[in-house]
Amino acid sequence: MPDQLVVQDLFIYPIKSLEGIRLPEAKVEEKGFELDRRWMLIDESGKFVSQRTCPLMAMLHVEIVGDSISVHHISNPGGLINIPFQLEGTEISSVRVWDDKIPARLVHSDIDAWFTEVLKINVRLVKMPSSTRRKVDSRYAVNDESVSFADGMPYLLIGHNSLKDLNSRLDEPVLMNRFRPNIVFSGGDAFVEDSWKKIQIGELEFQVVKPCSRCVMITVDQSTGLKGTEPLKTLATYRKVGNKILFGQNMVALSNGIIKVGDKLTVNKF
């Protein structure tokens, strides 16, 4: 009898490229989980900033406290900043996430100053208004979905045994936080998710639309903010298709609601 597939972890990343938060349950919305990547740091040109160019972002610890996001550098828990969910400026700024140019709201100049001082680069924090419609690539959209400030897709799914397979090939194992998934499941063979098209988690359906192509960001140690060569180097030896190195599956939600850690995951064969 095959292993039962069960949701092991659920994660959101309220501010793009900062530390994620593990949740016992999460609200599934079209753009991604509620609060997931609804905020983002941008440079002076309006382009998003990530650990690819600023690995120090890995060192910023994020929590949800009441109706606000609390952020501090892991070496300075007392030097935190609170960002209320509802806080937003009136100024609209056009921001860039890869090839997309979209409207966003600047949050507050005091918050910009805090991040600029901590990260040692000039940045501003922006929020995605609920009215902003950043379209999922039409090659992969099912119902003309929109996405948050995530790289391209609302949801990322990875099997725990896929990471276990990778770690069996590494001299030093890595944690799942290198890959920034939204949903981690236990059970099944390594990379079983590669063969899926449609799945159900609890009562909700998701469409698996494409494998996730990985980049240098997964070489940043999330506990130190230092870059290396792994696990990208090893993944390239057995997970490369064309010029892309694949790990995890991108999805869109076909229904909205709540999913929980411990929910059963079933695969729709049709």
Image: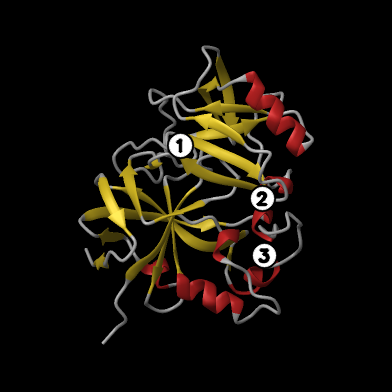
Q: Quadrant of residue 136?
A: top left
Spatial separation of the CA atoms under disc 2 and disc 1: 20 Å
Q: Position of residue 257 (x, y in %)?
A: 25, 46
**Name of the residue lying farthest toward the front:** 78
Vertical position of residue 52 compared to residue 22: above or below: above
Q: Earlier in the sequence, mark 2 or mark 1?
A: 2
Question: What label does residue 232 carry, if any?
Answer: 3
Task: Say what secondary structure mark 1 lies in.
Answer: loop
Mark 2, residue position? 58
Q: Nearer the viewer, residue 76 or 17?
A: 76
Q: Residue at 31% across / 47% down in the picture?
A: 253
Vertical position of residue 163 compared to residue 218: above or below: below
Left or right: 172, with 63 as reference point: right
Task: Say what secondary structure mark 3 lies in.
Answer: helix
Mark 1, residue position? 148
Q: Looking at the picture, which amino acid does disc 1 mark?
A: Ser
Vertical position of residue 214 compared to residue 239: above or below: above
Q: Residue at 53% across / 63% down in the picture?
A: 247
Task: Say what secondary structure mark 2 lies in.
Answer: helix
Q: Looking at the picture, which amino acid does disc 2 mark?
A: Ala
Task: Confirm or deny contact between disc 3 and disc 1 (CB under 8 A).
Answer: no
Q: Residue at 37% across / 68% down in the picture?
A: 195
Question: What label does residue 184 carry, if any?
Answer: none
**Name of the residue lying farthest toward the top:** 90
Which scheme is used to colour this image of the protein?
A: secondary structure
Q: Earlier in the sequence, mark 3 or mark 1?
A: 1
Q: Position of residue 112 (x, y in %)?
A: 67, 26
Q: Residues within 10 Å of mark 1 (few under 14, many from 20)?
A: many
Left or right: 69, with 143 as reference point: right
Q: Earlier in the sequence, mark 2 or mark 3?
A: 2
Vertical position of residue 197 compared to residue 141: above or below: below
Q: Nearer the viewer, residue 237 or 8?
A: 8
